[in-house]
Amino acid sequence: MATDLKFSTAGFRGTLGEIVTAHNIYRLACAIAEHVFTDPYYGFEGEGYRKYLAEKGLKFKRPLVLVGGDTRFMSQNLADVVCDVLTTKGITVRRAKYPLPTPVAEWAVLNEGAVGAVVITASEGEYFQNGLKWISYYGGIANNEVVADIEAKTPPVNMVTRSITEFGYKNAAVTEQNFRDEYLKHLMSFINVKAIKKAKLKIGIDPLFGAADNYFREFLTKCGGVEIYGINEGRDVLFGGTVPNAGPVSLKDLSKLVVSKKLHLGIACNSDCDKFGIIGPDGEWISPNHIAPVLLEHVITQRKQNGRVCRSLITTNLIDEVAKRHGMTVRETPVGFKYINELMISGQYIFGAEESGGIALSGNTPDKDGILACMLVLEMLAMSGKNLKQIFKDFYKNYKPSYDKKVSIPKKAVEIMQIMEKLNLRPPLSINKMSVWRIDQSDGFKFILKNGAWLALRPSGTENLIRIYAEAKDPKLPDILIAEAKKIIANLS
């Protein structure tokens, strides 16, 4: 059993040439192959997968795994390594013809009935990073049980002796498949294309040189009636010198485009498209915490979907207010979309959201889909007949706005552990002279105050950072709470 290769909330990822090497990807591919053949529930002969195939009326003589990568440096080469390992182990492999977004791979797994998929990506990591995501048969990122099995089955470094020096070869046992066009066809039937065409929208698109390239433009062109203005299309392994995370810093150029061309909206995705970014008509980046509740209102009132709602514990409580107004229940999860994924799989939940830009909608995949989220915002504009400003104005006639803020503090791993341990022993019972009503320790520490505001501190699942989050109805309070959190950390350091 190897212990050096670990998955985070965003899959396995790290610095290219240091942690992410052809050798380590080879080892993980070996572990995935063994997982596919031996896992008693998620594997090819597993109880869960076999039941799933029976419900779909499918049968396979050999396991089917889909493989692809995003536009990052070495993604396609590392996908070659995975293909080689899996075919050698007796697994049928279908390789993506184009750079493969994670949500497209997830949809393809469901559509094909595959036992899983491998996507080579570091999601929103910097240009010098890469990694691997394993998607299980249920169409979502590997859950904790699956990750533990793959980690346990990863062979030690010295157990893999095969030389890995050949990249870019054609493996005759691998079939190439156009998952892009198949996904876009699905999206055309899922989104109200007629309304979008009729609305005559002017939209800015920014794939950030990532896998959304040819998805945004292709879909909107197929819709018809949309004026498209694109930037950062094509492939650049340096991502134009920015971090491809669809946040406010990375979308400055999109903001300028929206303002200069007087567009209705700007849309963007991170490099593997599991998260989205929205630029409003005034060039402002709109937080997912503000978009998600409005989208939920749209899903309920315009799309007429009904059921339960789920969100992570650091996502805005305004989602709860929307759900409550329409008689729906809300489930709170730890941070990491895999927990929302598990709830969405049950079929009882119509909507899942995470503050970092992840949204899932029933009828699609159970996981977050940035491409879908962007098109859902366009659909909302088109079906309402309003611009984004009007939509928010009308929304806040029924709901009091919430204000949020997030910051990150870099710390060494040992310091983070010590701070969390000390916080566990001596948690504050009041913050800024406000009583702490309840402390949620399901993922770090979330201090809920008596006035409904809250402050959360938790270790990042992917980096050596302490994340701090705050939300309140008073627009000045989040900054005050963040400052108090910094004092708490300083006193415990």
Image (cartoon, rainbow, N blue to C red):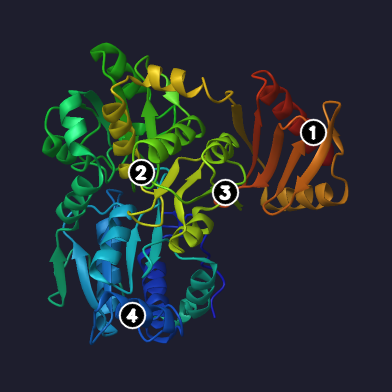
Q: Tell me, for residue 329, which label it has, or none.
A: 3
Gap between marks 2 and 3 measured at Cα = 24 Å
Residue under circle 1? 450
Q: Nearer the viewer, residue 198 or 468?
A: 198
Name the front one of labels 2 and 4.
2
Disc 2 and disc 3 in contact, CB within 8 angstroms? no
Gap between marks 2 and 1 measured at Cα = 35 Å
Q: Nearer the viewer, residue 376 or 268?
A: 376
Q: Residues within 10 Å of mark 3 (few under 14, many from 20)?
A: some
Which percent across, then down, holds residue 438?
79, 43
Mark yes or no: residue 195 visible.
yes
Q: Secondary structure at mark 3?
A: loop
Of the 4 image quadrants, the one containing the C terminus is top right
The amino acid type, in three-letter code, at marker 2 is Gly
Indicate which disc, 2 or 3, sits on the residue closer to the N terminus. Answer: 3
Among the 4 quarters of the image, the one containing residue 27: bottom left
Residue under circle 4? 162
Among the 4 quarters of the image, the one containing residue 473: top right
Name the front one of labels 2 and 1.
1
Residue under circle 2? 370
The amino acid type, in three-letter code, at marker 1 is Lys
